[in-house]
Amino acid sequence: MRGRKAEGARTKAAGKKKDMPQSEIETVQTTEKISRAEAAYRRRFDRHLDELKWLYMELYDNGPMFAELCDQLHCFYEERAKDLKKKDAEREKRPDWYKGNDMLGMMLYIDNFAENMQGVQEKLSYIKSCNVNYIHLMPFLDTPKGRSDGGYAVSDFRKVQPALGTMEDLESLTTACRKEGISVCMDFVMNHTSEDHEWAKRARAGEGEYMSRYFFFDNDAIPAEYEKTVPQVFPTTAPGNFTWLPDAGHYVMTSFYPYQWDLNYKNPRVFNEMMYNFLYLANKGIDIMRIDAVPYIWKELHTQCRNLKQVHTIVRMMRMIGEIVCPGVLLLGEVVMEPEKVVPYFGTVEKPECHMLYNVTTMATTWHTVATRDVRLLKRQLDIVNSLPKEYVFLNYLRCHDDIGWGLDYDTLHLWGCEERSHKQYLNNYFQGFEGESVSRGELYNADPVSGDARFCGTTASMCGVEKAGFEQDEEAMERALRRDVTLHAYMFMQSGIPVLYSGDEVGQVNDYSYKDDPDKAADSRYLHRGKMDWKLAEQISDKKSVAGRIFGQLDLLEKIRRSSQAFTVEADARTLDTGDDNVLGIDRVHGDEEILGIFNFSEYNKEVSVNGVEGTYTDMLTGEQLSPEKIPLPAYGFCYLARKHG
């Protein structure tokens, strides 16, 4: 009976609509849509309310501030554009939308890539030609000139750097990307603000309300206690974790640089306001929020102020806030630790935190493998990643905007007779081109003469020998360099997760030494690999004889191969293989009836390997040749993708 009554009510309502003027019908339809949208919001809010309130009150015990937060969540939802709400609804229906084998990212600096946001929008056709459907716009929010740390010292979370554009330009760019099927990622710098931020200025002027948003102390007693347990992030650039402000007569906590003031998340006002900034930016059309320096955001005396349980509470609340207001937005955590140690930042299946995390250690281990030609440590690293639940999605990359820190598994290396200090020295010497028959070119970053520690800077192409071969006009050396470059990308595509290119790598762009002529950049060697996009190289991508054309064409083929097989999806079973040769890495990926073998030669010698643990006849996906895993020929620095159908 209920069904008949409901059907009768709908028929009656439809009859009434027929008798209405068109304008009234449109008003009713709009009201119905609004009601459905509001109902969706209420459903999400009610689903998370109990846990969100529990965690918030456990952390802050402040009912009025929680009530304010809830009111503001609804306000930001109401302000969210219709097309963004539509995208949210679509992604809620397909929550694994980012886990397919079609995802390929590219990170870029807006000014280096195309001058400004409008320029990036004009280059979307080029980005699509790279098979890229996810772009990470490196920091673009307002920062002070000369004290920006590459954009990570934010002075205004709601303003774009004037040279890059405006918030309207950002919305225009994200709208254009959405139409082209391109997701947009940005950095959300949660741990600190610039000393030029309004809060910092008012704190410096002595306003208690704003001083409480940072860590201010009028003497060094408590800072000295922190220093006993808190490691320094950059010992050579920021000695100690506090900076004395003579004009304010106070110390302020500055974990990274003296001009970056750490936010005090024990203050609920800080959490609320930063969540409002997060939602404001999400409403500008951002798809992925990269949370910068996640482990550092909660400080506690007599601890290392790293990875504390309150960090996970904050990230969990942030995840729920996103799912309530903008469920189509993903959280990407920047956590620089080994894969098995970053796992807590994924949360649990019932209470998830980050959607994705960077695979930093595997990147560093990859370059260790390049320098040593020994795949054992890399194989061990990949085995750990492959043993983790498939729900955990990693972003994989060869190079990014930052330096390479040699945070390797030294306990294992020690068992193999390799000591940490001497090995770091070897790696840095190798990639500068000083030893190990290296063809790499690059520079050190944050070298510490006391400890002998240093990080390394350079583009993928320069580290693979493209720069050296080009300078010497040695075609044979160039062929080897390009083969190594492409092989490393082919290996990256075989890792579980989402591969990300650094802008310029697709055309073999080498180190840019012009940063030394800029007084604002000269002291920071990371600008060596942050050079301007060379569009003359990009114009050569159709020329198969040019360096750019050879790299671009081969990467294009690999990217299309990756999209063609379900064996490259996150859900595939992945494992490393025994190749019987410590110079050669084998990876096997299986999904359903599809199987792909990736075999990678990290040495300068031609090889013929026999792969244990697989059998049958495979097809070389690049040549079409039929091969047996018992006899696989590999050129120096070369690779092969071998495919087989089961059943």
Image (tube, helix red, strand yellow):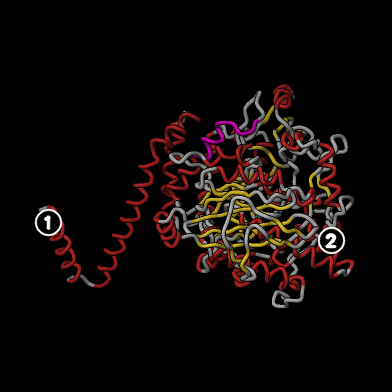
| Disc 2 target residue | 514
Camera-side residue: 460 or 61?
A: 460
Q: Which residue extends farthest bottom? A: 543
Q: Which residues are magenta?
A: 305-316
Residue 343, position as x, y percentages in the image = 56, 39
Cα–Cα gap, marks 1 and 2: 76 Å
- Where is residue 214? Give x, y as percent: 64, 34
Principal secondary structure, stretch drawn in magenta: helix
Badge 2 crowding class, 10 Å Cα cut-off, few under 14, some 14 to 19, many 20 or more, is few
x then y, percent, for residue 453: 82, 39
Check disc 1 and report its element: helix, strand or loop. Answer: helix
State yes or no: residue 423 in magenta. no
In the rendered structure, the answer to whether residue 64 lies left or right of residue 559 reads left
Query: Which structural element holds mark 2?
Result: helix
Q: Residue at x 71, y 64 (%)?
A: 504
N-term mark: 1 or 2: 1
Along the line of sight, which residue is nearer the eye, 207 or 125? 125
**Is there any visible trace of residue 169 in the rendered image?**
no
Where residue 122 appears, as percent x and y from the top left, is 62, 72
Q: Is-magenta flag for residue 306?
A: yes
Task: Check disc 2 and give the amino acid type.
Answer: Ser
Residue sitting at 76 percent across and 39 percent down? Answer: 234
Q: Residue at the location (47% across, 29% down)?
A: 58
Residue 627, compared with residue 435, is above or below; it is below
Q: Which of 34 and 487 lies nearest the eye of the viewer?
A: 487
Disc ID at residue 5: 1
Is 410 placed above or below 376 here? above
Q: Is residue 567 visible?
A: yes
- Residue type at tag 1: Lys
